[in-house]
Image (cartoon, rainbow, N blue to C red):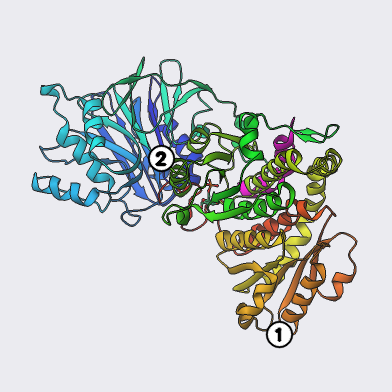
Amino acid sequence: MCGIVAYIGSQQAMPLLLEGLKRLEYRGYDSAGMAVTNEQGQLQITKCQGRVSVLEERLGQGAGLPGTSGIAHTRWATHGRPSDTNAHPHRDDESERGSGIALVHNGIIENYASLRTWLEERGHTFTSETDTEVLVMLISELFDPANGIDLEKAVQAALREVTGAYAIAVVCEHEPDVLVCARKGSPLMIGIGQGEYIVASDPSAIIAHTGQAFALEDYQVARLTRTAFRTSTLDNVCVSPKILNLELELQEIELGEYPHYMLKEIFEQPRSLRNTLRGRLDTIEGRVVLGGLSDFIPNLVRAGRIIMLGQGTALHAAMIGEYLIEDLAKIPTEVEYASEFRYRNPIIEDRTVVIAISQSGETADTIAALQEAKDRGAITLGAVNVVGSSISRMTDAGVYLRVGPEIGVASTKAFLGQVMVLTLISLFIGRRRFLSAETVSQYLRHLETVPDLIERVLEQSDAIRETTARYVDRENWLFLGRGTNYPVAMEGALKLKEISYIHAEGMPAAEMKHGPIALINDGMPAVFVATRNSQYDKVISNMHEVRARGGRIIAVATEGDQDITAHADDTFYVPDLPEALQPLLTTVPLQLMAYHAAVLRGHDVDKPRNLAKSVTVE
Ligand code: G6P
């Protein structure tokens, strides 16, 4: 959801900003642009609709943008369609009124309409349809160096007037050796180099330059020069940031031998889940070790109710978590879209624990719902991937997914990481309530085998591609499952929709009879997650219902299940596991189907139409 990169130092800014934009392009890719301050202190801006490669081409046509400080942006449109004019950076009026200020922004300025009217009354002329242009004009209006209001103070003053979410980076011709950044709601990190700073929406654009960084907190402003930085609140009170050591390896964010990040991340799942599990399983004592939860054990064991919140794929992981927590920890559990929870006056009782599930830890709806839960007195936990992200900082405690950076827009390894962490949390609590050491040990021994078992499923990738090719021209698909495989079906449908633009619906297999069955026509693919478990026979009956109406059945079944071939047109096999753990395997063939379908249809798998990886606006 928009990527920001900014630089001030001694190197040429343009190539560095371009490289950073390429790393952040997963956040939005409908337009891109940059502003670089040249030696004379003048701003040079190039921006255009389209991918970062289009910007690169445009920059390559001229002399480029010489200079050693600048700001850059890759956009996911909110206010104003993708166009050259609406692309960032935005600058204040070109006329005499202008102070030579340019800005890039990630987020939404909610009160932009009233601010725009006020600024127009004061003679400012707007050229774009964006909310961002309002912010740069407001900073310009307040900028008054003759009266001591420099760029930093003008940014502070402007942001005091703004409601909404923002991460911004601002430069100004009057202060060519200064870069000002600020955040509320949208992430922004500042990398500290030798005589240089690199600012970015996430660490992937920083780690090639430095391992030292700090995250700006909400309502904080940073003023950077080549040699020093200062962080303050919007009221200009100095604050000291906590410096972090980024532990990312460059290879973790490079494609290597894979054609797409999504395929790389699907194939990385055995390794990423080994990381999720590392040091957390005590099979001898039958215990799960989750250091992040240790201070809250009494709250968890006595919890009267657990509410899990998330959006998109994270919500599907939460739905699996609901089955697991109720089954293994025996605590009543609910799952809700964070976006709905927040606005429906939710009831938080005394012993309610709220768990936010999120890959990025920056999803605006999930953050807002979590805040609501905190305000109403809930204990809050996070199951988050990005270390130091907003959700990880807001929650009382949490468990990191540890699956490494996920760059493909369609979430894969983070989903399995979320399911794994929720499985661990269920066993962690369950063992302290009703589960015996022996039972937990058995589960843990199975969990240890999951990475190797996933490798076996991945070996079927070519076969899955061949099967998918036979159905890929069909525009409507159903995904069906029961029990823990019902959310897996939902996730399978979401993956297919996201990257191949095929209409797909996931639902409980039994629900099909209550309406969706009317959709089934000759040759319509229905993917059944039909592993051997307590509801196997019922799922087989549902297959008959589809077949009788001309639908074609693709089954995900348990290895060794020969009977299924009598009911399904095509079958992919996964190794056997206890029912509660099956989603860790049954998800994988569906990820591969979606991937191959998108490639076969000629789509850009890592940059699907209209989507952004991290949705930082509500
Ligand atoms: C967006 C992404 C999804 C993701 C959802 C929640 O919609 O496209 O892939 O599942 O946000 O993101 P989170 O970072 O909170 O898991």
The residue that label 2 is drawn on is 186
Q: Is residue 175 left or right of residue 207?
A: left
User: Residue at coordinates 53% horizontally, 43% vertically from top-left?
Assistant: 350
Task: Give the image location of residue 532, x and y in percent.
Answer: 84, 62
Question: Residue 552 versus residue 57: which sits nearer the camera?
Answer: 552
Question: Residue 542 versus residue 570: which sits nearer the camera?
Answer: 542
457 inside magenta stretch: no
Can the viewer see residue 358?
no
Q: Secondary structure at mark 1?
A: loop
Q: Is residue 600 left or right of residue 74?
A: right
**From the viewer's perspective, is residue 84 above or below residue 105?**
below
Classed neighbour count for the residue bearing mark 2: other residues with Cα under 10 Å, few (<14), some (14–19), many (≥20): many
Classed neighbour count for the residue bearing mark 1: other residues with Cα under 10 Å, few (<14), some (14–19), many (≥20): some
Q: Amino acid at mark 2?
A: Ser
Task: Give the image location of residue 507, x and y in percent.
Answer: 64, 68
Task: Give the image location of residue 35, x and y in percent.
Answer: 31, 36
The residue that label 1 is drawn on is 549
Say which quarter of the image contains residue 559: bottom right
User: Residue at coordinates 63% horizontally, 72% vertically from top-left?
Assistant: 477
Please, what is the dominant secondary structure of the magenta stretch?
A: helix
Say which quarter of the image contains residue 62: top left
Question: Residue 423 versus residue 199: which sits nearer the camera?
Answer: 423
In magenta, the rendered stretch is 258-280
